Image (cartoon, grey):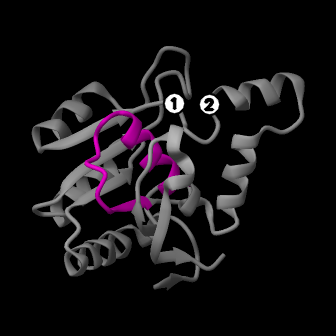
Amino acid sequence: MYFNTPGPANTEQTLQAAYERGMELGIDEVVIASTKGDTAYKAVDIFKNFRITAVTYHCGWKEPFKSVMKEDIKKDLESKDVKIISATHALSGVERSVVTKFSGIAPVLLIAQTLRLFGQGTKVAAEITIMAADAGALTGKDIIAIGGTGRGADTALVLKPANQSDFFNMFIKEIICKPIC
């Protein structure tokens, strides 16, 4: 499925298409980018009988020492059996800080930029998969990974996950949906 425009207007369609494809393939794990919890709440309503992992920004992303996802939202989602991961961006991390301070380019940022050739949501879906894998939230089986452009969800992938130490073992098996621009 292809969307004419990126962004949150595609969230419900993305989640529904990802759920249906996951059911067809016998996949029962989904990793979702959810900054403040909105997309995770929508996923709870759709992904029945799936292990749901929601990945948000690391503490300090917007303001030093502050989490973007509010603690009460995190606790409520966890009460609904959603695993919440707050971690450093796997495809930038400290390298972004080094490049900002000293300029130049770094290998991880090249990987991120290459994934963005398929859209921001593709990069996000791959990145949150690494973050969830590194946090021990995944079983290692194929998953559905859902990312977006800005807010909401507009990209869903079927992929074989990997930890960052084995990044090149990750494999994008299918693109369920994404924006065309």
Look at the image and give the residue range highlighted in magenta: 124-146
Q: Badge 2: how crowded within 10 Å, few (<14), some, or many (20+)?
A: some
Residue at 52% over, 21% down: 60
Q: Badge 1: how crowded within 10 Å, few (<14), some, or many (20+)?
A: some
Q: CA distance from mark 2 to mark 1?
A: 6 Å
Give percent across and percent down for residue 175: 47, 76
Give percent across and percent down for residue 105: 84, 39
Give the residue type at disc 1.
Thr
Look at the numbered discs 2 and 1 and tell me whether their residues touch, using CB distance below 8 Å. yes
Q: Quadrant of residue 36?
A: top left
* First reached walking from the N terminus: tag 2 or tag 1: 1
Q: Is residue 56 left or right of residue 26?
A: right
Residue at 52% over, 65% down: 7
Q: Nearer the viewer, residue 173 or 56?
A: 173
Q: Taking 25 as reference, is 32 above or below it? A: above
Which mark identifies residue 43?
Answer: none
Give the residue pinned by disc 2. 93
Give the residue pinned by disc 1. 88
Give the residue type at disc 2.
Gly
Give percent across and percent down for residue 113: 72, 54
Q: Count the marks: how many?
A: 2
Tag 2's secondary structure?
Answer: helix
